[in-house]
Amino acid sequence: MGVDLKDLLSRKPLELEELKGKVIAIDGFNALYQFLSIIRGADGQPLKDRSGRITGHLSGLLYRNSNLLEMGVKPVYVFDGMPPSLKEVEISRRRAVKEEAVKKYEEAIKRGDVERARTYAQATAHLKDEMVQEAKTLLALMGIPWVQAPSEGEAQAAHLTVKGDAWAVGSQDYDSLLFGATRLVRNLTISGKRKLPNKPVYVKISPELIELKESLAKLGITRTQLIDMSVLMGTDFNPDGLKGVGPKTAIKMIKERGCLENMIHELRDSGFTVDPLEIRGIFTSPKVTDDYQLRWKGVDVEGVVHFLCHERDFNEERVKRALDKTMGEVEKVLKPPTLDAFLRS
């Protein structure tokens, strides 16, 4: 999902401790899909409560946010609204991929190939409306604010950084940079490792920071040109892009021609059916809102326990233990500074 810019952008290793006191606008759908894909049983089946309701997304939110809060990070989650009409092709493509993955999963189970089955199962993750509402409920009980975007969540998260209401966007995708995010933090994980696709191998990972201004300076291009490059490579709004055009070719084309306006006829002759300037406009003038309030509150331990343990069959001891380790740091973040502390600052 999203544009693959990893080979072009300047990245810096980052320790979670460096994010203490900073607001990170987390792409909610990106995070929930990650939890639903990874948090599964040995055979790839999603975790469920006794009523058959999937709970992996709630488990991921509980433990990741407990870790972030313990580190003094101030997360705010941003959830997608109505996607632009141009995204329908990509949405249909993802739906087809999931359907194919379901078939391959069932075939692998019949063969007794549990490892392969689990790999296919991760690609079948489906985020339902009720899961999003459950996520919002848990976040509220944990005292973590969330924002409902009118359209693309990454656009809204980027808007928070531009306004100075968030220090960075937290996401695995790079699209928030196209929407103008000042900073992007990737790999906000609590495990410190990630499984390689299609391999029974885990690699160590650490959070990394990408600063838009620095990356653009090193590439010698503007943000608009970065968007134009991405349109050539293919975005969520034109998945195919130009055949055979990757990051290196795209940046060469943009540096030679300057912008998409100078390539309109060439693009149309190459079978580019979507108006490239319309795609650019989604990134440069996204639908966002200023109707939000970012307020972090104390954790409602009793409410979280009731929601997760009494209603969703989570282990009460584990839930309380996860919450207990966050309480002291959350109180420090919420506690107003004293006059003495102010005078010493």
Image (spheres, grey):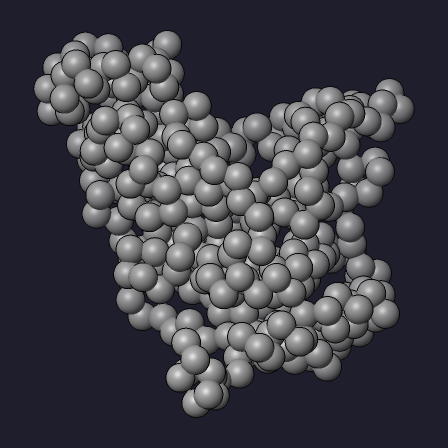
Q: From the viewer's perspective, is 153 left or right of 302?
A: left
Q: Residue at x 61, y 40 (%)?
A: 206
Vertical placement of 324 versus 1: above or below? below
Report whether residue 136 is seen: no
Splitting the image into 4 quarters, where does residue 84 fall? top left
Please name whichever residue, 242 or 112, is drawn nearer the observer in this view of the structure.
242
Splitting the image into 4 quarters, where does residue 332 fall? bottom right
Vertical placement of 213 versus 118: above or below? below
> Could you say where residue 93 lies in the image, as x and y percent from the top left?
48, 29
Please name whichever residue, 58 or 218, is drawn nearer the observer in this view of the structure.
218
> Could you say where residue 126 lies in the image, as x and y percent from the top left?
61, 44
> Could you say where residue 282 lies in the image, as x and y percent from the top left?
26, 42
Q: Residue at x 53, y 44 (%)?
A: 14
Give the quarter of the figure containing the C terminus. bottom left
Q: From the viewer's perspective, is 302 left or right of 41?
A: left
Q: From the viewer's perspective, is 33 left or right of 278?
A: right
Q: Which residue is drawn at 14% across and 22% down?
A: 258
Q: Residue at x 54, y 70 (%)?
A: 144
> Could you say where residue 67 lies in the image, as x and y percent from the top left?
66, 59
Splitting the image into 4 quarters, where does residue 69 fall? bottom right
Q: Which residue of the protein is positioned furthest toward the bottom in this rendering?
A: 339
Q: Which residue of the protein is positioned furthest toward the right in this rendering?
A: 112
